[in-house]
Image (tube, rainbow, N blue to C red):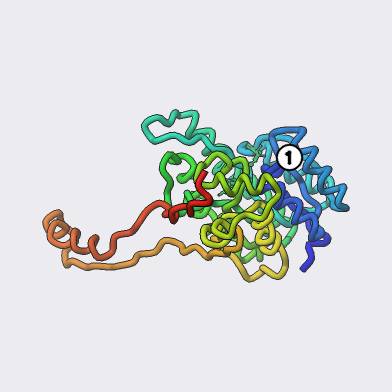
Amino acid sequence: MSLEGKVAIVTGSGRGLGLAYAQELARQGAAVIVNDVDEATAAEAVASITSAGGKATAVVAPVGSTETAQRLVQAAVESYSRLDIVVTNAGVLRDKVLWKMSDDDFDTVVNVHLRGTFTCVREAVGYMREHEIAGRVIAIGSPAGQRGNFGQTNYSGVKAAIVGMVRTWSMELRKAGITANAVIPVAATAMTATIPYFAAAVEAEQAGQTLPAFFRHDLGFGTADDVAGLVAFLASDAAAGITGQAIGVGGDRLQIWAHPEPVFNAYHEGGWSVEALEDALPDIIAAHRQSVGESFPPLPDELQR
Ligand SMILES: NC(=O)c1ccc[n+]([C@@H]2O[C@H](COP(=O)([O-])OP(=O)(O)OC[C@H]3O[C@@H](n4cnc5c(N)ncnc54)[C@H](O)[C@@H]3O)[C@@H](O)[C@H]2O)c1
């Protein structure tokens, strides 16, 4: 597999997962537009790629606006003459329970993740369609979006919406040969470093040690590099037949996520009145209740911190 001759944009690629994606895409031969809000971080990311023999250029700008999205596509075309791959990875957290979440907490997360994904993919796909490039859209979801998560109204909302957009894009882009998939990553990064449950894993990662098997295997929690292979594969010609999927990677685990679909149909002639529901719904729910949230096994004693 090679990405030689291809050009990619990776948003939020100054550090964390985005950096790992940019480095792996470059290692496979793609030229990469590195994007971040922090100039020094973006410059370091570019240096890490070029010093390893890869091609990269930085665009320091906050994703969300159409203007930034246009700048990113323009940079790809001006620097490397084309665009084949867009990875919408930039992200921020503003966690609070619903009743404490401000408009600003909500809007900030919506702007970076949801609007940032929408505007960047719209501009990228506009270019790909115009130039008849069978490109690749790789959007980033989260287990929180798939299952819900306490304290993450804004984040779980946008991550679920991103996967919703990917389903629609895979349908709209099929004729142009452009694939659209969601990657659902789990990794030790700045974003997960403060979660007490993962403390022993983050500690091992920072010490440059292999994460304990409990994290890598049982929980599917590893390093940013563990996720990068999937992003590079989906970006390649070998993945031309894969579209509309939500695929998770963490540590040693790969997961195919289901899309929502009805699990049970019941019919009542004339429709479902309150009385008919009162009669039937409690038993139907008892038989088909859907769970929410992620459930984690208890931490083994030696990994308690
Ligand atoms: N770490 C995980 O386990 C995990 C799990 C699920 C999903 N994700 C998602 O993966 C992506 C990367 O997460 P991470 O853990 O590497 O986080 P991170 O905080 O380490 O990195 C995010 C990067 O995005 C940049 N960024 C923030 N706002 C930006 C903006 N407006 N424009 C451009 N860049 C911006 C940051 O400066 C930072 O470099 C996010 O979308 C996150 O929601 C991460």
As helix, strand or loop, the secondary structure at mark 1 comes to: helix
Expressed as whole percent of the image width and height from the top left, the position of residue 303 reads 53, 50
Classify 168 as above or below 200: below
Expressed as whole percent of the image width and height from the top left, the position of residue 120 reads 64, 46
- What's under tag 1, amino acid-wise? Arg
Residue 215 in sight here: yes
* Tally of numbered tags: 1
Q: Nearer the viewer, residue 175 or 285?
A: 285
Classify 155 as above or below 82: above
Q: Residue at x 61, y 46 (%)?
A: 202
Classify 66 as above or below 130: above
Asked if residue 263 lies left or right of residue 158, the reply is: left
Asked if residue 84 lies left or right of residue 279, the reply is: right
Give the residue pinned by disc 1: 71
Residue at the front extreme, as displayed = 302
Q: Nearer the viewer, residue 86 or 154?
A: 154
Q: Residue at x 22, y 68 (%)?
A: 267
Expressed as whole percent of the image width and height from the top left, the position of residue 238 reads 70, 70
Q: Residue at x 69, y 34 (%)?
A: 37
Q: Residue at x 87, y 47 (%)?
A: 51
Expressed as whole percent of the image width and height from the top left, the position of residue 281 reads 19, 60
Q: Quadrant of the N terminus?
A: bottom right
Label 1 near ligand 1 (CB < 8 Å): no
Which quadrant does ligand 1 occupy?
top right
Write down the quadrant of residue 179 in the picture: bottom right
Write down the quadrant of residue 64 in the picture: top right
Write down the quadrant of residue 166 in the picture: bottom right
Residue 137 in sight here: no
How many residues crowd mark 1 within 10 Å: few (<14), some (14–19), many (20+)?
some
